[in-house]
Image: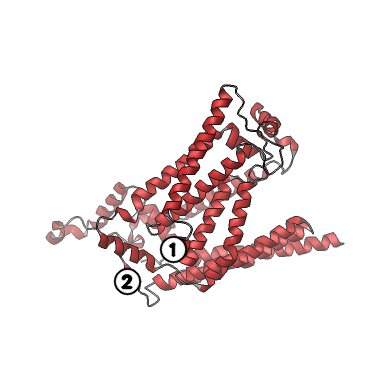
Amino acid sequence: MIDILRQVVFAFFLLAGLFIQITAVLGVNRFRFSMNRLHPAGMSDTLGLMLMALAAAVYAGFEPVTLKILLIVALFWITSPVCSHLLGRLIRETDEKHFETEAKEWKP
Amino acid sequence: MKKQKPDFFSAFHAWLEYGGSSLDREMTESLENKPETGTVESKNKPKSKKKTPPQNNPRRAYADAWWYRLLALAVAAAMIWLLAEAVARMPQFGNADTLADSELTEFYVEHTKEETGAMNIVTGIILDYRGFDTLGESHVLFIAVCTVLLMLSIYGEKDEETRLKRNEMERHFEPGDDVILQSAARLLTPLIFVYGIYIILNGHLSPGGGFSGGAVLGAGLILYQNAFGYEKIERFFTYKTFKWVSVCSLLFYSLAKGYHFFTGANHMDSHISTGVPGNILSGGLLLPLNFVVGCVVACTMYALFTMFRKGEF
């Protein structure tokens, strides 16, 4: 019984993670504006990765591997939002079409 | 005019049609310009550099044909099938029967531990049996950095004014005092450094070694530099540090490996004991060699980053 329950939880997390990742891939490829693209890109690195890693953790059970998987999730949850923030900041500073920027003056 | 496609596709088609051969591009442009070059005025300047936008290009029509899309789908499906097949045929992890039936593999598996003192067979192979190959790889890294320094260094600019202007221009879009990045870097940089050093020092015991550990160290340096700027990192890592660490590491590698090869080829005792396999201080030359390779790789990563970014340390 507990095995079936575990497999159900595992399948749920895996399918949810797959759904998020596919959405992210579609969004990154289909959106036109860079800020819009940033949103699915950050989503896949945080939510999608967490769901997939949780699926792997449930599949592994209580093992040392589980701790490592959770550590990976923690590392990505620290770093990925920072990356998204920096990218957004760079877009804000250089996209002269949509924002008021100083980029024009600095063109070589 | 057709409806414009999303960015990715139009960029891809532009690359397909314009990125190919320059001859192709010129032919397309001459075809495009033919009806316009009827007047005398435009004949005087036949070399108009204006590129035709992708959606006006008649050669693009094939991209919208049904067979083209079907072909693209078929190619993608074939690639997916190939990769999935390759993954499905991989040997099971940890299966003892999957070793290739090769004399060399058997020799390595049987003798690496006692001959080199390495628990990690890969390190034993790349730093001992094929140490000459790894020596060349380290030097290739150094040569690559030298070339990049020659080409991209800001000191290559002739006059002071251009140099200053370029420096200012490339510093303008740096993150600067970004509190979010600095908080993350304050938390992560020590962990990254410790992890890199662990990978390097445990290279002969566990998966890892000089190259991977050095890459992690270089990434830590790059993160620190990005978050806190050049003033902070110049307290412990400057051009002088890079120069001395790289050159000394490569010199040590060459001398140590030369000594090892010389004594080995002449059947002399090299007086370097392999110790007890599994101890941290074991494996003879493997530990110092891993260390110097890690130093070279970390310096190279950081130098490449700074050169491509700004042209100055």
Q: Split into 4 quadrants, where in the image is the C terminus of chain A?
A: bottom left
Q: Choose mark 1 or mark 2, whichever is in front.
A: 1
Looking at the image, residue B67 lies above or below residue B56: above
At label 2, the amino acid type is: Lys
Question: Would residue A14 be seen by someone viewing this image from the given angle?
Answer: no
Q: Nearer the viewer, residue B216 or A17?
A: B216
Examine the rendering and report whether any part of residue B302 can be seen. Answer: yes
Dot 2 corresponds to which residue?
Answer: A104
In the figure, B203 relative to B189: above or below? Answer: above
Query: Which residue in the rendered view is the most extreme toward the top?
Result: B266
Quadrant where the image shows the N terminus of chain A: bottom right
Query: What crowding class fits label 2: few (fewer than 14 Cα within 10 Å), some (14-19), or many (20 or more)?
Result: few
Is B130 rendered above or below residue B29? above
Instruction: Name the residue furthest front.
Output: B271
Residue B290 x/y as whole percent: 58, 43
**Chain letter for mark 1:** B
Q: Secondary structure at mark 1?
A: helix
The residues bearing labels 1 and 2 have C-alpha atoms spaced at a distance of 25 Å
Residue at 51% of width from left, 58% of height from top?
A: B221
Residue B6 coordinates in the image, percent (x, y): 45, 65
Residue at image x 60%, y 22%? B267
Q: Quadrant of residue B284?
A: top right
Does mark 2 fall on the same chain as mark 1? Answer: no
Identify the residue under disc 1.
Answer: B230
Q: Nearer the viewer, residue B141 or B30?
A: B141
Q: Is residue A105 left or right of residue B69?
A: left
State the mark number for residue B175: none
Residue type, label 1:
Tyr
Q: Position of residue B20 (x, y in %)?
A: 36, 49
Classed neighbour count for the residue bearing mark 1: other residues with Cα under 10 Å, few (<14), some (14–19), many (≥20): some
Exactly how many numbered labels are in the figure? 2
